Image (spheres, rainbow, N blue to C red):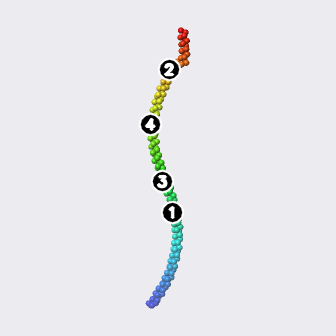
């Protein structure tokens, strides 16, 4: 084969390769367009899903924020109650100190009363003994009615004598 023929064959081969390349390039562009179109479609779907997730997250975050506000309000109320209770406890502590002092005084008073009751018991025993003695002495003595009767009898006896 001659060089001319070889060049012609090479030109034909190049032309054939060029045609085939264009065919593949067109096919590649078509596939690239399809991929690009599918990518855009999938991107839109993903964005839609992200928006739904974002809305859901936003609503949940809003709910949590509202609950947080409610919890903070409750906590503030509890803080006020705690402060009131702290004041009450302080007042009760002061009152308890006064009660302790009063109980101490009452203990001393009860001790004195016990001593006084002891003395009164002793005095009562003496009074009982004295009353017993007086009773005994009274039984030994004549009462007024008997004395009047005896006086009359003595008077009668004296007259007879």
Q: Which residue is mark 1?
A: 61
**In x, y percent, where is residue 13?**
47, 86
Q: Secondary structure at mark 2?
A: helix
- Of pointers 1 and 2, the one earlier in the residue sequence: 1
Q: Which residue is mark 4?
A: 108
Q: Which mark, residue 84? A: none
**157 or 121: nearer the eye?**
157
| Residue that appears at 46% across and 40% down | 102
- Of pointers 3 and 4, the one earlier in the residue sequence: 3
Cα distance between the residues tagged 1 and 4: 68 Å
**In x, y percent, where is residue 134?**
50, 22
**143 or 23: nearer the eye?**
143
Cα distance between the residues tagged 1 and 2: 107 Å
Cα distance between the residues tagged 1 and 3: 26 Å
- Of pointers 1 and 4, the one earlier in the residue sequence: 1
Q: Secondary structure at mark 1?
A: helix
Question: What is the crowding at mark 4: few (fewer than 14 residues within 10 Å), some, or many (at least 20)?
Answer: few
- Of pointers 4 and 2, the one earlier in the residue sequence: 4
**85 or 46: nearer the eye?**
85
Q: Nearer the viewer, mark 1 or mark 3?
A: 3
| Residue that appears at 51% across and 59% down | 67
């Amino acid at each position: 084969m001659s060089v001319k023929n070889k060049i012609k064959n090479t030109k034909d081969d190049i032309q054939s390769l060029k045609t085939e390349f264009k065919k593949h390039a067109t096919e590649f562009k078509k596939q690239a367009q399809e991929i690009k179109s599918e990518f855009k479609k999938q991107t839109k779907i993903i964005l839609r899903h992200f928006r739904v997730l974002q809305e859901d997250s936003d609503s949940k975050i809003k709910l949590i924020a509202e609950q947080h506000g409610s919890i903070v309000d409750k906590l503030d109320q509890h803080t006020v109650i705690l402060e009131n209770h702290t004041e009450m406890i302080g007042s009760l502590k002061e009152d308890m100190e006064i009660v302790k002092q009063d109980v101490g005084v009452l203990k001393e008073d009860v001790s004195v009363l016990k001593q006084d009751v002891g003395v009164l018991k002793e005095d009562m025993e003496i009074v009982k003994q004295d009353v017993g003695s007086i009773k005994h002495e009274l039984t030994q003595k004549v009462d007024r009615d008997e004395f009047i009767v005896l006086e009359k009898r003595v008077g009668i006896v004296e007259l007879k004598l």
